[in-house]
Structures are given as C-alpha cells and as structure tokens.
Image: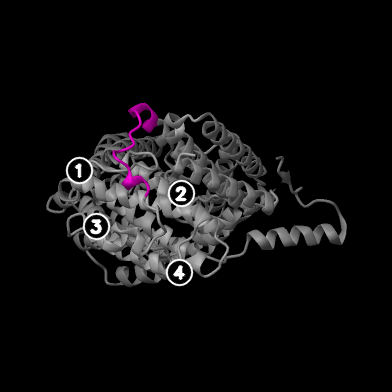
Amino acid sequence: MNPRRRPYPSGTGGAAVRRRSAAAARVLSPRGALALRKVDGAFTHALQAAIATALPVLPLLPAGRAEYAVYTILGSFTTTFGQNLPYPRRARVLAVVAVAMTACVACGSVLAAWAQPWKGGAGAAVVVAAMAAVAGLAKFACDATRLGGLGAVLLLFSFAVAANASPASFADVLPQTALAATGAAVVWAVAVSGRLVHPDRPQRLAVAAALRAVAELLEATGAGEEGGPVRNRATSVVLQAYGSLGLMPPAAAGRGARGSVCVRLTDLSWSLLIDTDCRPPDDPAEVARHLRRQVRLLVDLRRPVPALLPELLFPSAAVPTGTVRGSAKAGPERADPAACRAAELLVGRRPGHTSVLLVPALRMVLGTGLAGALAVVLSLGHGYWAAISAAAVLHSVNVRVTAQRAVQRTLGTAAGLALALGVLAADPGPATLVLVIVLLEFLLEYVVARNYGLGIIFLTPLALLLTELAAPEPARALVLERGVGSVLGIVVGLGCALLVVHDRAAVRAERAMAVCVQAAERAERALTDGLERSFPVVRTRLAAAVVELREADDAAAGELWPAEIDPTELAAAEQRAYHLLDRLARGR
C-alpha cells in the first residue's frame, strides 16, 4: 500500500494561482480557535501552581527586594510541564525542566551582562540571535519529548527576560540563577508532595479521560456520525490511561481494591472501544450516560476511589455481552517489567525521522529571529516581546494550528492588555503586584488547557506586571509597546509558517501508514502462530500505530503540502487494525 503525495501547488497562470489560494484558505481557516476543551483536575493544578509561585516570593517582600521575585517566578513556570503524569514520571520530567529553566535564566543573565543589549548595536543583535537559537532548540526538544502546553515559549521567555535585563552585571548572574533554581525547586517539591494528599490523582484523571472519550465515541456512533477521528482520540486517551497505570491493554483484574477499580474501568474503556467498531451496544447513548456518571465520581478527588456503578459491574444491563472481558478472567494478565516499559515507550513515541521535527524548529528560529530583529530596527521598547509572540504563534504542529494560535493570541492579547492597563492604572506597590501576579498565575493555569486564547488573557498582564516589577515604567507606554510588539510577532510568525513549507509532514504520514501496515501484519502472524505471550506488546504496538497514522495524516493536512493518503485506504487500514485488536482481545 503506497500512499500518494499531493504535489505542492506550482506552475503559472490562473490555475496555479487558484490552487495556491485554495491551499492557503484551507490551512488559514480559524475554525476551532475558540473551541473549549473539557479538563479535569484543573483547579487542583492551578492551586498548586499558585502556591508554588507564592512560596519563594513571600520572603523577598519583607526584605524589600520584590524586584528579585521576577526570577523566582521564572523558575516557577516549571509547574506547567507534565501536569497529569504519574508522580514518579512527573518528578523526573520536572527535574529535567527545572534544570533547563534555570540554565535559560543563567545563560540569559550572562549574556545580558556581556552584550549589554539595552545599548543597542551589536549587543542587541547578539541577543536576538541567541533568542532565536534558544527558541529553535526548545521547540525541537519539546516536540521530541512530546511536552505540550506552553512548552518552548516559557523556556524562551525565561531566557529573554534575563537576557534583556537592564542594567545587568556579572555580579547579578549568581543571585538570579539561584532565585530561578529556588522557584523551580519549590515547584518540584509542591508537585511531588501532592502524592501525600491525592496519591492516585493522575491515575483517576487518566481513567476518567478514557471513559469520557469512549462516551463521546458511543454518542457519535449512536448519532450515526463518522467516528474515525473520535475513535482515534479515544484510542490515544485509553492508551494514555494504561500508561498512567503502568500496564498494557487489557490489564484484567487489578492489584488491590483501589487499583482494581481503575484497572477494570480502563479495561472496560478498551473493550467498548474495540467492540464499538465490530459490535456496538444496542443503546450506545445509554452506555455513554453510565460512563459519564462514573467520570463524575472519579474526578471528585475529595472522595476515595469510587466503586464501579452497578450498570458497569454487570455489563448485561447496559453493555454488550462479553464487553468486560479483561476483568472476567481468572487472574491478571501480567507482562514482564521490560515488556511494560517497552509498551510505555511505544505509546509515547512518534514513528518517523528527526527531519520531521527540523522544519517546525526552523520556522521557530526564523520567526523569532526576524521578529526580534525588526523590533530592534524599529527601536521598539522591550523588543523581545515581538520575538516571544512570534514563537508563541509558531509553537504548533502545522500551519492550520498556527493560524488558530494567531487568532487566539490576537484576541487574548487585546483582552489582556485592557486588564493590565486597569491594574497598572491603580499604581500598585511591589507587594500588591506580587499578589496580583500569583492570582494571574492561578487563573492562567486554570484556563490555558481549555483554550490557549483564554490563557493569553492572563499571561499578557502577568508578563507586563513582571516587567513593571523589575523596572517601573509609565503604564500607557508599557501597554502600547506590548501591543505593537505582539502584532509584529504574530504577523511575522504567520508569515514564516507560510513561507517555510513543511513537506516532511507528508513523509511522516506516509511512514505512519507503512508502520501501521507492518504492525497489522505482525498481529496477524501472532494470531496465526498462536503466540499468546506476545499479544500484549503486539496489541499496544498496533494501537499506537493506528493512533499515529491518524495524527500524522491530520498534521500533514494542515500544511500547504499535505500527504494525499486516499481516505478509503486510511479507513481500510484503521478498520483492519481495530478488527485485529478485537481478535487479539478474544485470543483468536
């Protein structure tokens, strides 16, 4: 099966112009920019973020050094990474990110002291080039490790703030670095200590997300809608739930009362996911309602792990016979630890080549560098804001998402500037500024996962107040500079996304199709040869491959040069994969 690639619009004359216009209109559509996502556990995470931000800042206020709070807050931005990972894994992720964030502040402080960019000339140019390099490296690293959220933008922001500090000397490097490290360390401690309060929080939220995704799939099935994208998302979320539990699908009976509920619910999600393609329930909407009731019980972290609802304990009442196959077995299906670790890596890996990650990083480098350079040429105050705005727009998977980010950034910045102007007009003191910043951090973490634009409403005044805290300036001038810099960065970022064509996204889609076909062939061989011991890894590999196939095709479809995989071939590959997953679950 050889997917075909659609050639990039070329040629001369009116037909070529129309092809280019159609391709640009397709990827520049802002549809979906204002959509809201359902996020569980956002309040708890936002509260932890606010506490972690406030703790290292409070001792600075009585000492009269509120301006140093900027650097502890930069370190505290570590809190946005790996929000719902299991505690051991999040501890590792936050430790690495804390080192990276601290290094960004340290390198930025050294560069500011050496280049003195506030004087203009070569020093300002060096800082712009350094910001572009940091942006590209951060984008590449975040994509390679699949760290979502604001990711590379926060790493760049920490570097840019430190690199553009005015005035700066080498004597400031060590204190600023130490303060950033302190802020990051407090975030790590607060995040890890959450295990004492809600030890199973990540697992409960992951299982709840799996149940909700399967409920959406059942509702789409009941309404007769095309379920390919919905099923793909459900498969991805269910695999993440198994990864959070450290198991492979299906895991069967759990370990202990608490574990057994989450494991059996995840097995139920898996069974419904597979059955929906072959044997949908008689009343999908009714089953979906039961799943959503269980979700509400799981996300209520004030209560212990709830027991399964009777309708889900006895599937004959609501679910097709044999659906909860995993929990009906005599004992748990356990794979060896090495196999579990391999499956975990498979779920988190994207098949492909490093070249797939290079073009987005190149876009980030060019956009950040060009926006920063234009800001220097135009003598804009705080010119690094233009570079950060360009990076924020380009921190996306394709041109379509870049266009959505541009819309979100524009609307969010406009609302955020109005909010910032209102706060600055009150002429708050340093202590009040710090308290407002902590509140804005809480609101940012609470809403940004729902919609990026909502997060920008609070991120914009947060950045302005940090600037005001470090070096007070007239409010109107500060807001105007931020507005002009943001517009410049958004326009430059969107332009770079269109000019730098990402043809490697099509290659990723083609490779994903080949990987899915190979995984299906391995599954068929395992079934034919009766290699039951290999079923757990084969199942996980096949499920991960079919998820990657749909994601790669969607990512390529958002570029000017998409992969032309015949929709019928894609649907056939997905149907074959789910049919094999059903056979693997049945063991025949």
Please name the residue that numbered disc 1 is placed on. Answer: 256
How many angstroms separate mark 3 from mark 4 (CA)? 28 Å
Please name the residue that numbered disc 2 is placed on. Answer: 236
Q: Which mark is residue 66?
A: none
Residue depicted at 26% across the width and 53% down the height: 49
Residue 445 occupies quadrant: bottom left
Mark 3 residue type: Thr
Mark 2 residue type: Ser
| Nearer the observer, 132 or 477 | 132
Which element carries disc 3, helix, strand or loop?
Answer: helix
Mark 1 residue type: Gly
- Label 4: how many residues lie within 10 Å, few (<14), some (14-19) or many (20+)? some
Mark 4 residue type: Ala
State the image coordinates of residue 475 (x, y, percent, origin top left).
36, 66
On the question of residue 472 being in view, the answer is no
Q: Earlier in the sequence, mark 2 or mark 3?
A: 3
Q: Nearer the viewer, mark 3 or mark 1?
A: 1
Q: Earlier in the sequence, mark 3 or mark 1?
A: 3
Q: Which mark is residue 414?
A: 4
| Nearer the observer, 469 or 547 | 547
Please name the residue that numbered disc 3 is placed on. Answer: 44
How many angstroms separate mark 2 from mark 4 (CA)? 35 Å
Magenta residues? 325-341
| 347 sits to left or right of 429 | right
Q: Earlier in the sequence, mark 1 or mark 2?
A: 2
Which element carries disc 2, helix, strand or loop?
Answer: helix
In contact (CB < 8 Å): disc 4 and disc 1:
no
Say if the magenta span includes residue 334: yes
